[in-house]
Amino acid sequence: MIIKQPYTIHENFLSKQNYSELKEFLYGQQISWYHRTYDSPKNLLANKNGFFSFCWYNDMRPDHPLFDKHILPILNQLNAFIPVQVRANLVHRDVDTKESDWHNDYYKDEVKTAILYFTTCNAKTLLNIDEKEIVPIDSIENRIVIFPSKTKHKVIYQTDVHKRIVINFNFI
């Protein structure tokens, strides 16, 4: 019997050129980061610094003029039919907080989540697979992990670099 893995990981997901252009934008001076106080809905283990987010797509429409240039090619590569939300998250190193709460991005069966990493560091994404198995995913540049959006997951925050950036894709 073959058991299908409930998640996939792809290394070097974007071409070097596409990855470099997007990383330059994310780490540059022209992006409008918005502060968010809570790192997960329950906020039991809130990151005391909060975090910053930047939305490309939200509320059933593109939310930034660079959506077509930066995000559409990635959604095509993911075979995404309908985007639900696409946002970048920036977290600063925080010695007071170890991890976020477990959370789901969306509860619909047809929605998938993909996390594209832009920082190699000691942070990890933990996936809670069927309440039985915890799978750690290392934060490695240009790696993407794809899993059902209703999968509980959380982040263990980095302690070795000043900031960590990922793009979170939710799509059908």
Image (cartoon, helix red, strand yellow):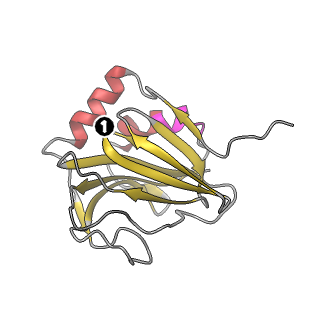
Count the marks. Answer: 1
Q: Which amino acid does label 1 sit on?
A: Thr
Q: Where is residue 42 in the image (x, y as percent from the top left)?
A: 44, 78
Residue lying at the far top in this picture: please name it: 16
Instruction: Identify whether 50 is placed above or below 42.
Output: above
In this rendering, position of residue 83 left or right of residue 7: left
Which residue is depicted at the point 87% across and 37% down? 1
Q: Where is residue 97 in the image (x, y as percent from the top left)?
A: 28, 66
Closest to the observer: 82 or 99? 99
Q: Position of residue 161 (x, y in %)?
A: 20, 45
Which residue is depicted at the point 34% across and 29% down? 19
Which residue is depicted at the point 21% across and 61% down? 94
Which residue is depicted at the point 37% across and 44% down? 67
Q: In which quarter of the image is residue 34?
A: bottom left
Magenta stretch, main secondary structure class: helix
Residue 119 within the segment the image draws in magenta: no
Indicate the secondary structure of the residue bearing disc 1: loop
Q: Can residue 55 be seen in this view?
A: yes
Q: How crowded is mark 1: few (under 14 residues within 10 Å), some or many (20 or more)?
A: some
Instruction: Identify whether 101 is placed above or below 70.
Output: below
Q: Where is residue 160 in the image (x, y as percent from the top left)?
A: 22, 46
Residue lying at the far right in this picture: please name it: 1
Residue numbers of the magenta segment = 74-79
Q: Can residue 114 be seen in this view?
A: no
Closest to the observer: 99 or 75? 99
Q: Mark 1 points at which residue?
A: 120
